[in-house]
């Protein structure tokens, strides 16, 4: 067994948790020390190449450790996610695996997101909740062209889901160039190569187009600072979905958008995470 480790600021604890959620090949351990603002992030894996890939992206160190019943420590393979009877998200990688998934879930749209190291397979509470909100919202747009923007695209799963649900134009962006690369690969894997993904810093971005649905699954402080631009990107009366917010952060964060005219129609809490769906101001 091999372990990758790195010291990090305590404020990024939830970001590490979300980044590695849904990957059965990796076991994340976060160690905190009372009174200190630094945490130790460790990821245990059976194969060295898995921790080397993490080190290449985030730095840190690697060491080999004695294998202590890896099978017992490992998570079981992540089951497919069923979304409103219309979408199925699975971890299929190859064309043969995707074909098998389509056969097993006939009549439903398949989204294949391999459980690589990690930009979200849809199993994390934030992504899973927004997937359901997206399927619900797309129903009212059926039969006419509609556009979606995915801010903080991660693996591209939400943008791909929008394409599967009939969006005529989809744009996704992320601050992390690796996330953009992974999103593009996943779009090709899911026969949604028309989606445009770009490397974009939301805090420097200027909205030049309006979308029927805008999704922002990003940290609360980025949301608060970025809400003026984010809301400008939603067509009047359109739908805004936000996630990645801890319960302790939710009330003041959502209040910023409320002051800018957003009406929150639905707020969902799953565990320690909050997601919200609202309507943009009409003017």
Image (tube, grey):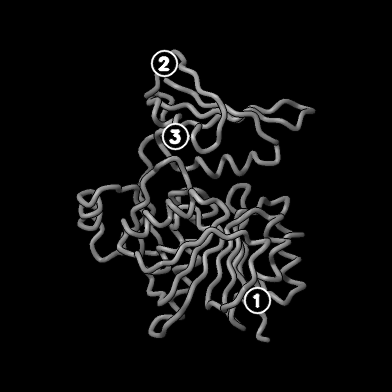
Relative to 14, is 112 on the left or the right?
left
Assign a secondary structure to mark 1: helix
Q: How crowded is the residue under tag 2: few (<14 C-alpha within 10 Å), some, or many (20+)? A: few
Q: Which residue is mark 3?
A: 53
Q: Is residue 42 above or below residue 150?
A: above
On the image, the x and y values in percent for residue 249 come to: 72, 53
Nearer to us in this view, 264 or 11: 11
Mark 1 vs mark 2: in front: 1
Figure quadrant of the C terminus: bottom right
- Residue at image location 50% in from the left, 61% down from the top: 198
Q: Is residue 165 above or below residue 130?
A: below
Mark 2 vs mark 3: in front: 3
- Residue at image location 64% in from the left, 71% down from the top: 206
- Residue at image location 49% in from the left, 72% down from the top: 148
> Which quarter of the picture shows residue 211?
bottom right
Quote the CA–CA distance across marks 2 and 3.
20 Å
Q: Is residue 48 above or below residue 20?
A: above
On the image, the x and y values in percent for residue 67 come to: 41, 16
Picture mark count:
3
- Residue at image location 38% in from the left, 74% down from the top: 166
Assign a secondary structure to mark 3: helix
Assign a secondary structure to mark 2: loop
Counting residues from the N terminus, which is met first, the one under dot 3 or under dot 1?
A: 3
Counting residues from the N terminus, which is met first, the one under dot 1 or under dot 2?
A: 2
Q: Which mark is residue 232?
A: 1
Figure quadrant of the N terminus: top left
Q: Which residue is mark 2?
A: 67
Counting residues from the N terminus, which is met first, the one under dot 2 or under dot 3?
A: 3
Q: How crowded is the residue under tag 1: few (<14 C-alpha within 10 Å), some, or many (20+)? A: some
- The answer to whether mark 2 and mark 3 are in CB contact below 8 A is no
């Amino acid at each position: 067994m091999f372990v990758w480790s790195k010291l990090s600021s305590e404020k990024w604890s939830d970001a590490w948790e979300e980044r590695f959620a849904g990957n059965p090949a990796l076991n994340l351990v976060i160690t905190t020390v009372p009174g200190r603002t630094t945490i130790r992030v460790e990821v245990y894996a059976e194969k060295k190449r898995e921790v080397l890939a993490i080190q290449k992206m985030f730095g840190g160190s690697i060491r080999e450790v004695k294998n202590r019943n890896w099978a017992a420590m490992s998570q079981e393979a992540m089951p497919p996610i069923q979304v409103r009877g219309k979408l199925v998200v699975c971890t299929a990688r190859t064309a043969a695996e995707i074909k098998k998934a389509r056969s097993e879930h006939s009549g439903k749209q398949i989204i294949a997101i391999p459980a690589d190291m990690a930009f979200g397979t849809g199993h994390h509470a934030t992504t899973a909740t927004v997937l359901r909100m997206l399927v619900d919202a797309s129903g009212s747009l059926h039969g006419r062209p509609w556009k979606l923007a995915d801010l903080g695209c991660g693996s591209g799963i939400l943008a791909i889901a929008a394409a599967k649900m009939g969006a005529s134009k989809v744009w996704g962006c992320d601050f992390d160039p690796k996330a953009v690369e992974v999103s593009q690969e996943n779009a090709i894997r899911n026969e949604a190569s028309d989606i445009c993904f770009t490397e974009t810093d939301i805090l420097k971005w200027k909205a030049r187009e309006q979308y029927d649905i805008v999704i922002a699954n990003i940290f609360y402080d980025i949301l608060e600072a970025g809400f003026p631009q984010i809301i400008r990107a939603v067509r009047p009366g359109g739908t805004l979905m936000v996630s990645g917010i801890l319960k302790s952060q939710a009330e003041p964060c959502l209040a910023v958008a409320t002051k800018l005219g957003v009406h929150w129609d639905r707020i969902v809490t799953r565990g320690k995470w909050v997601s919200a769906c609202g309507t943009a101001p009409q003017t």
